[in-house]
Image (cartoon, helix red, strand yellow):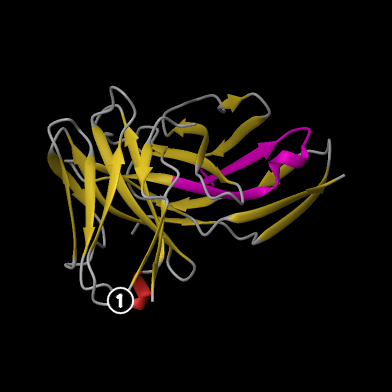
Amino acid sequence: DSGVTQTPKHLITATGQRVTLRCSPRSGDLSVYWYQQSLDQGLQFLIQYYNGEERAKGNILERFSAQQFPDLHSELNLSSLELGDSALYFCASSELAGGPLGETQYFGPGTRLLVL
Amino acid sequence: AQKITQTQPGMFVQEKEAVTLDCTYDTSDPSYGLFWYKQPSSGEMIFLIYQGSYDQQNATEGRYSLNFQKARKSANLVISASQLGDSAMYFCAMSLFNQAGTALIFGKGTTLSVSS
């Protein structure tokens, strides 16, 4: 158990809908990261928040948004869902912001999203 | 652009044998971190080992060691005395720093199958 929690574990929804994925980082960790894992794209970085501020952004679609709250939990909002958004979405956390040498990121169990 | 390459889609090994999973990386940054993660069939991502670009010694964590050859830009994972529970997908990753935050970029992974 990494100490990172994600809810829900599974989510089935229809195209065009909007969903919210929730993540609680390990106790004491200030950074939260979101990743998408799909068969065709592999594991892709979406976005990083550090202590409430956006710090790094990957190939996150405009239909996707995230935020980190004062209690450090984070939510990833996915809207106007398409079939291709079906994937495993991971949240990860680390103690600090990472830096040039990187920092170990601890992953949650993931939310498996299926868009029908 | 930074890139991680894992050329072995699948590896097969018998219990108690050692196995090496290959990883090469491409970056022009002098500072970076290299990581290995394990993803069992249950889906979670488990951190295994880290190597910083300035570390002189190869990292070791129990049965895992990272064979870091900087000039060749390789960071192979060596698992000694394989166990059935080592059967999983293994991902090599590298830190990508953008002055404000850090992401991990991942290779496509190698599936390891351990047989008795």
Tell me where residue A24 appears, x and y as whole percent.
30, 36
Q: Position of residue B20 (x, y in %)?
A: 69, 44
Q: How many marks?
A: 1
Task: Say which element carries label 1.
Answer: loop
Q: Nearer the viewer, residue B59 or A41?
A: A41
Query: Which residues fall within the magenta stretch?
Result: B71-93
Q: Is residue B107 above or below residue B56?
A: below
Query: Does residue B31 appear to the left or right of B6 in the view shown?
Result: left
Question: Is A47 within the magenta?
Answer: no
Horizontal relation, residue B95 to residue A70: left or right: right
Q: Name the amino acid, label 1.
A: Glu
Residue depicted at 60% across the width and 26% down the height = B60
Residue B70, can we see it? no
Image quadrant in which the C terminus of chain B is located? top right
Residue pictured at 34% horizontal, 28% vertical: A26
B22, above or below B47, in the image? below
Q: Is residue B42 visible?
A: yes
- What percent of the width, then of the height, locates residue A75? 22, 48
Q: Please state if B19 lies on the left or on the right of A102 as rendered.
A: right
**Residue extending farthest right:** B116
**Dot 1 falls on which chain?**
A
Which residue bears the numbered disc 1?
A82
**Residue at image coords 84%, 40%:** B15
Q: Is residue B88 magenta?
A: yes
In this rendered view, identify the residue nearer to me: A94 or B98: A94
At 25% from the left edge and 35% from the top edge, which residue is drawn?
A31
The picture places residue B57, in percent across and down from the top left corner, at 54, 24
